[in-house]
Amino acid sequence: MAENASVETPLVDIRHLKEYFPINTGWFKTTPLKAVDDVSFTIRRGETLGLVGESGCGKTTVGRTILHLYQPTGGEVIYDGKPIKTKADIHEFRKKTTMVFQDPYSSLNPRMTVSDIIGEPLDVHHMYPNKKEREERILELMDRVGLNSEHASRYAHEFSGGQRQRIGIARSLAVDPEFIVCDEPVSALDVSIQAQVINMFDELQEELGLTYLFIAHDLLVVRHISDRIAVMYLGKLVELADSDAIYERPLHPYSKSLISAVPVPDPRVARANKRIPLIGDIPSPLNAPSGCPFRTRCRFATDACAESMPPLEEVEPGRFVACHRTAEINS
């Protein structure tokens, strides 16, 4: 956990980030799909920010846009106090940041050996003076993520899902990053393997001082690893707070529904908890509702919710909510 957060410059500062994709909707006509629409947050050095929401809400696009795998439509990405704008900025930025992808089956090149997969970032950034040091670095990375040295000459298809994700994590560590975007890194793995990989992320953070943006839809996983949690709906942030605060007392109607669906291991507590079901399906981002995007599924919605999008405001110290009726529905 970050200390002296109030006086620290955040490592990652995202301001009004937008990512719109032009979609062909007819003869010579395109409509912008607003995958990420005016998203702002910060991540302190050494912190893990969890980003949660339903499939299709824009979580992965946020991660990829921050790393400039997609060119942002608008807004700013500020890293360690410096805006990332030019090609030179992006090149330097990518030496300090990296990504662990969701699917360990499709994110590894089947024609490359494990050694070459892990060593590829070293080659791209010319990070070793000779082959001997390159090989030593690769074996060191493999050992760090729990892979044996004899695995180096084998191919990705020879490994289980958990081992493949370890290969992907070793590759992400090759450039000695400070910041890693973890894009649902355990969702494709068996439950028994998920805990091992999550614990490894924790250990790596402690040993190497890493900072994470941890994207996931499994709220139990997010709570275990995150210091703070941001809840996303249809391209917008609707709540941002400390991990425990969101789980113990969610304030936004959407957050309340998500938390109510989390299974509780104690049967008595589970029976006492009331599930808050959502009405209908998530709208298409091509034809998003006016005002608050959640209003079509919200039992507290009023006419005001259709007229304007509520800003993400600090309602308690360190706690931000985007809802016109936060005070009323939580009184």
Image (tube, grey):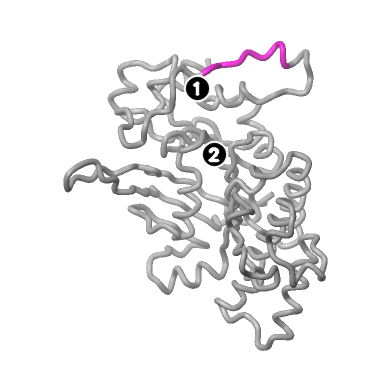
Labels 2 & 1 near each other (Cβ < 8 A):
no
- Secondary element under disc 1, as helix, strand or loop, is helix
As for residue 60 lying within the magenta part, the answer is: no
Left or right: 306, with 243 as reference point: left
Pointer 2 residue: 230
Q: Quadrant of residue 122?
A: bottom right
State the mark number for residue 6: none
Residue in the image at 73% along x and 41% along y: 190
Residue at (55, 76) in percent of width and height: 124
* Residue name at image x 72 percent, y 57 percent: 166
Q: Quick one: 175 or 8, which is closer to the camera?
A: 175
Please, what is the dominant secondary structure of the magenta stretch?
A: loop
- Between residue 137 and residue 88, name the one nearer to us: 137
Query: Which residue does the numbered mark 1 point to in the structure image?
Result: 253
Magenta segment range?
A: 270-277
Q: Residue furthest left?
A: 27
Q: Badge 2: few (under 14), some or many (20 or more) residues near its Cα, within 10 Å? A: many
Question: What's the CA distance linking mark 2 and mark 1?
Answer: 14 Å
Residue 304's place in the image compared with 64, above or below, is: above
Residue kind at label 2, given as amino acid type = Ala
The kind of residue on which mark 1 rests is Pro
Question: Residue 113: x and y, percent?
Answer: 68, 70
Relative vertical location of residue 197 with respect to residue 87 in this rendering, above or below = above
| In the displayed structure image, the side of residue 18 where residue 307 appears, left or right | left
Which residue appears farthest toward the bottom when viewing the image?
A: 130
